[in-house]
């Protein structure tokens, strides 16, 4: 009964005073000593319960009066694409009209000069005939009749010499002596036979056209006709390049001229 009354007193902040009859210590000393630990445990439990209820009540009160804390709203970000305005098209100016072509004035025709007339050939003036002087006959005797004088006969006219030709024909050119390569005193060596052509049994005839300078030296060398082997053609060209020639002559003057030089490659025993 006392524990219930104590619990009610905890819940009621203003409990009414009650008179409790004193219990004589003499009647139940043993029961009080047995209940004392139990009462202490109950009081502690009730105190914990009361504190818990008070804490819960305070929390409920504070939660009612304080507004709920709401998280901040996230404002959406709107992105709008604005198309760029196209650049204005360049203003194309119309091409300027071409300037009018200047009017060409017609040139007056040039006067045509008359071709000069060839001079008339002058007729050759014949020299006047020389007068023929005739001597009178000697006087004869008076008894001889006098013969009539003979008529004078004109002397024959001699033809005049023909005038010399105006243009004199040019003199004939001096004869030309061709260049030579076969003079004994030149001592031109024969071309060397290429070893590879010798092993391959190559033969042939090379015809070279050589331009001989006035000094008797070979100038330009061309292959007029090939032997069919490039090695033989090259060997002939290299040999003739070291030769000496007799220069061509026109009269007493040495001139440049061309000469054909045949080179024959032939193996022994063929």
Image (spheres, rainbow, N blue to C red):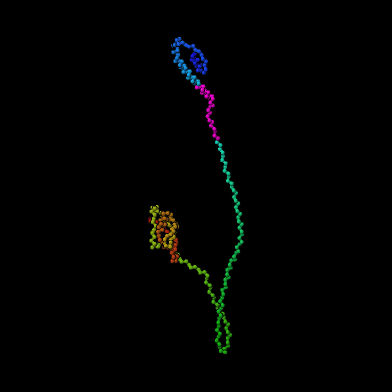
What x and y, as percent, mark residue 177? 44, 64
Residue sitting at x 42%, y 54%: 230
Q: Quadrant of residue 78?
A: top right
Q: Is residue 77 magenta?
A: yes
Residue sitting at x 59%, y 66%: 115
Horizontally, is 231 left or right of 96 in the view? left
Q: Quadrant of residue 131?
A: bottom right
Q: Is residue 191 magenta?
A: no
What x and y, as percent, mark residue 270? 39, 55
192, 123: nearer the viewer: 123
113, 177: nearer the viewer: 113
What x and y, as percent, mark residue 43? 47, 17
Residue 198, above or below 180: above
Q: Quadrant of residue 225?
A: bottom left
Residue closest to the far bottom: 143
137, 111: nearer the viewer: 111
Residue 145, above or below 161: below
56, 228: nearer the viewer: 56
Start-end of magenta stretch: 55-78
Residue 54, above or below 166: above
Q: Is residue 125 visible?
A: yes
Q: What is the total number of numbered labels drawn onto the structure image?
A: 0
What x and y, as percent, mark residue 63? 52, 24
Q: Is residue 198 visible?
A: no
């Amino acid at each position: 009964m006392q524990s219930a009354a104590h619990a009610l007193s905890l819940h009621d902040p203003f409990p009414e005073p009650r008179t409790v009859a004193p219990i004589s210590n003499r009647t139940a000393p043993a029961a009080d000593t047995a209940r004392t630990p139990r009462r202490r445990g109950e009081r502690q439990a009730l105190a914990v319960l009361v504190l818990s209820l008070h804490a819960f009540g305070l929390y409920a009160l504070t939660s009612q009066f304080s507004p709920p804390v709401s998280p901040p709203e996230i404002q959406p970000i709107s992105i709008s694409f604005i198309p760029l305005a196209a650049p204005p098209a360049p203003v194309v100016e119309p091409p300027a009209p071409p300037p009018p072509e200047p009017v060409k004035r017609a040139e007056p025709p040039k006067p045509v000069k008359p071709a000069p007339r060839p001079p008339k050939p002058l007729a050759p003036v014949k020299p006047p005939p020389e007068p023929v002087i005739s001597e009178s006959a000697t006087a004869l005797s008076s008894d001889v009749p006098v013969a009539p004088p003979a008529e004078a006969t004109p002397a024959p006219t001699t033809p005049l010499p023909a005038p010399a030709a105006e243009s004199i024909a040019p003199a004939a050119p001096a004869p030309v002596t061709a260049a030579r390569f076969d003079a004994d005193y030149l001592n031109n060596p024969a071309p060397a036979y290429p070893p590879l052509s010798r092993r391959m049994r190559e033969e042939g005839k090379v015809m070279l056209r050589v331009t001989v300078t006035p000094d008797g030296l070979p100038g330009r060398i061309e292959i007029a006709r090939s032997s069919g082997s490039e090695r033989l053609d090259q060997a002939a060209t290299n040999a003739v390049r070291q030769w000496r020639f007799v220069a061509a002559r026109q009269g007493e003057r040495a001139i440049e001229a061309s000469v054909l030089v045949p080179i024959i490659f032939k193996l022994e025993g063929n």
